[in-house]
Amino acid sequence: MAGDRVEHLTEEQKAALEAELAELEGPKRAAAIEAIKTARSFGDLSENFEYHAAKTEQGLLEARIRKLRERLQHAVVVEHDTDDHVGPGSIVEIEDEHGEVMEVTISAVGGGVSATSPLGTALIGAGVGDVVEVEAPRGAWKATIRAIRR
């Protein structure tokens, strides 16, 4: 179940999520409520495009707020003073079973391999030389960690 997972974040990533949540719960939510109030004043709600658009935007906003709250609730802040183990923000060079070398960036917020993806989950906490098993939807595979850097 998605709600039972731990999400590894750096202090900076957690702060960015908290800042986004504060913006959404404060000014953005107030603007959405005001847009609905204004659209209501236009009359018949059954044919009021502005009202339906404002309600849709409010729904998307509230969904994003729920998602951020869930992520922060399950967040575990990790500190990496060294490059000994893979964590959020690590750039990892791996070699698969067929000798193919890949470089991946582990990300908890976006812009790389998600720390909660099958590959990210397998790599988090592993060190150079470790062989990890990746439980991917298309089948399990193994990779050897060749290098870790920030």
Image: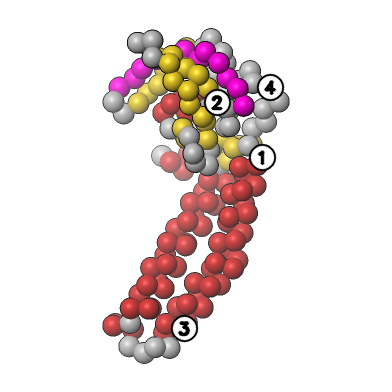
Q: Between disc 1 and disc 3, whose residue precedes? A: 1
Q: Between disc 1 and disc 4, whose residue precedes? A: 1
Q: Is residue 29 above or below residue 123?
A: below
Q: Quadrant of residue 43?
A: bottom left
Q: Amino acid at mark 3?
A: Thr
Front-most of 4 and 130?
Answer: 130
Distance between the Cα atoms at labels 1 and 4?
15 Å
Distance between the Cα atoms at labels 2 and 4?
13 Å
Q: Position of residue 108 (x, y in %)?
A: 53, 38
Q: Which residue is denoted by mark 3 in the rendering?
A: 38
Name the residue rendered at 47%, 62% in the picture. Answer: 61
Residue range in magenta is: 139-150
SS label for mark 4? loop
Image coloring type: secondary structure
Task: Report the predominant secondary structure element of the magenta stretch.
Answer: strand
Q: Position of residue 129 (x, y in %)?
A: 53, 9
SS label for mark 3? helix
Q: Which residue is denoted by mark 1 in the rendering?
A: 11
Q: Amino acid at mark 2?
A: Ile
Q: Amino acid at mark 1?
A: Glu
Q: Is residue 6 visible?
A: no
Name the residue rendered at 59%, 37% in the picture. Answer: 9
Foreground label between 3 and 2: 2
Distance between the Cα atoms at labels 3 and 2?
48 Å
Q: Quadrant of residue 135?
A: top left
Distance between the Cα atoms at labels 3 and 4?
54 Å
- Mark 4 and mark 1 in contact (Cβ < 8 Å)? no
Q: Which residue is denoted by mark 4 in the rendering?
A: 82
Foreground label between 1 and 2: 2
